Image (tube, grey):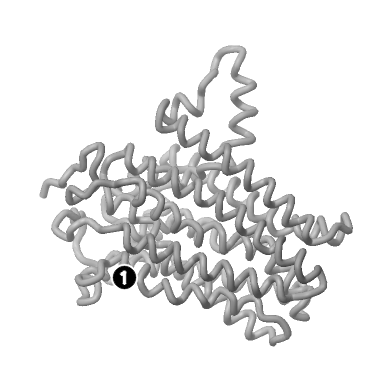
Amino acid sequence: MARYTASASEGLQGRPILLRHQLAYGGGNLLGSGALAISGAWLLYFYTTFCGLTLIEASFIFSVASIIDAISNPLMGYLTDNFGKTRLGKRFGRRRFFLLIGIPLMMFYPLLWVEGLSFWYYLSTYVVFEIIYTSIMVPYETLATEMTDDFSLRSKLTGYKAIFGKLANFLAAFIPGQFILLYGKDSATPFFLTGLTYGAILIVAISCLWLCSWERERGEEVETSAKKGLLSTLLSLAKDMRSTFYLRVFRKHLGMYLCGFGAEWLFASIFTYFVIFVLQHDPAMVAGLNSLNSILQLISTALFIGLCVKKGLQQTLYPGAGDRHFRGSAVYLAVVFPSTVRPGDSADVRHYRAVRPGYRRGLLYTLDRLHLPGRCR
């Protein structure tokens, strides 16, 4: 069956992708980047300082959540791929249904920041939030290819996603910093208020995403393989993961993804401890430094996305190869590229994975998460 190809100004089903749609799609990354940025920068410090947990107990919580995250990602991908066959999926959409139920669940986030409770409370709440996070982010990652087949439009959607990711990083640093200045460094109240405030922001962001997004018609989806059960699909996916390493482009992108994401989360995890306990600075100083970092990343992201759309990926990545500008370009990429658009998020790589034979989008969009489950702790 032939696919409907979107025009340069329209998405699938003839719907124009306007600025509000691009902003709403990008706003969904306030969950993907912001909630994890707050947790990455402050949750370990919060657990060990205000909750009475040892460093080993806090690290164990993140380790368990990482394992569950690695399992839940492909399961969620399989579920969203097949949810369109159900009554709820036909009515609300196989992807957007999970966005809808995720809107009220965003108020679960403040429960992570309650002090003085047991180890099992913090373990269970963090694991539950990881599952909620996965149930929203896996469908969200597929929406760009659901809304349009046009590369330029997907690049814009991906670009706004990256920009909102850096905005989320700024909010993740700015909000707790202001509450720490108000209540002091010895109080746990700033962290609970941060969770409450950001939970409200997430409700607004996911609501706008749900209202301003759509999915392709079921008849437009190309079925490339026979129907399989969950176990056989996951086994086939595991076997196929080995064959992907024969692809040079996949190895390169996976290496960039692992190094970029790993370095980012490792830095976020130890930076707070380093500034507070080694340099003996106030926690507000950490928030200020993170805010400055996020502002610089936001500017570099906007510039890099503009270059990608205007010049193309190859000319942007290799602007001066072979001449005297090569070293300057290399420095530029070393500083800017890791903090802007990760290779796993680029529109063409996402689309390449979406059309690989034998698998559907939901499962394919979880491949990179399988190689880097959870966070670096």
Coordinates of residue 342 in the picture (x, y in percent): 51, 44
Dot 1 amino acid type: Phe
Tell which of 219 and 77 is nearer to you. 219
Name the image quarter holding residue 40. bottom right
Q: At numbered mark 1, what does the secondary structure look like: helix, strand or loop?
A: helix
**Furthest residue toward top:** 323
Side of 232 relative to 266 (left or right)? left
Mark count:
1
Tell which of 321 and 230 is nearer to you. 321
Tell which of 196 and 359 is nearer to you. 196
- Which residue sits at x=54%, y=57%? 33
State the quadrant of the C terminus: bottom right
Q: Residue under label 1, please give it.
A: 97
- Which residue sits at x=72%, y=56%? 287
Side of 117 relative to 107 (left or right)? right
Above/below status of 245 relative to 47: above
